[in-house]
Amino acid sequence: MLSREQLQGLYRYCFCLTAEHGSAEDLLQTSLEKWIRRNKEVEYSHAYIRKIIRNQFVDECRREQKIAFEAIEEHTPLLLDESCLETLQIQHHLIEQVFNLLNAAEREVLYLWAIDGYSASEISEELNQPRGTILSRLHRIRQKVFDATKEHTTALAGARS
């Protein structure tokens, strides 16, 4: 039915949303069960399963009364140059630190941008959100990465002296 690679990709998406291994496994299982029940002929559709996963995640957040997606103000700065994130080189030990700084909405955008290679417009269509919202999230991600890198560089400089 699903290959190991496809399941791993879906699991990574779940993990980006939940930021917890156990929750990601539960989310994936629940979503796959829904997908199997809805389809009489089970055929793999990455976008459709990812939509089920996202909807399931939002439903669970609402049920637990978590606020996973923060409101975006009208006048937030926009990321004008999307290539800035590509030029940043994040060292392996910084990835976990940065990942913990991001909220679920930012992790989802980062996943779609970095892993699936979507553009801001494609992410906007996929999530059914305005392009400006996506650009704002990318800007916030970039700022958090920059701040974390700056803190790390400062800590390294202090340790060397």
Image (tube, grey):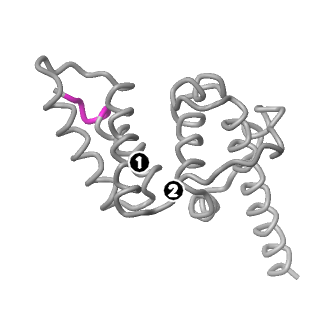
Picture coordinates of residue 13, whole percent (x, y): 42, 43
Residue at image position (82%, 32%) is 81
The local crowd at label 1, few if under 14, some if 14 to 19, many if 20 or more residues have their Cα within 10 Å, is some
Upstream in the sequence, badge 2 or badge 1?
1
User: Do the numbered discs 2 and 1 sit on residues whose CB atoms are within 8 Å?
Assistant: yes
What residue is shown with label 1? Answer: 58
What residue is shown with label 2? Answer: 68
Picture coordinates of residue 130, whole percent (x, y): 65, 30
Give the alpha-carbon distance from disc 2 to disc 1, as whole Å: 8 Å
Could you tell me the amino acid type at mark 1?
Answer: Val
- Say what secondary structure mark 1 lies in: helix
Tell me: 101 left or right of 86. Answer: left
The local crowd at label 2, few if under 14, some if 14 to 19, many if 20 or more residues have their Cα within 10 Å, is some
The correct choice, above or below, for 112 with respect to 12 in the image is above
The segment highlighted magenta reads 2-6
| Outermost residue to the right | 161
Q: Quadrant of the N terminus?
A: top left
- Say what secondary structure mark 2 lies in: loop
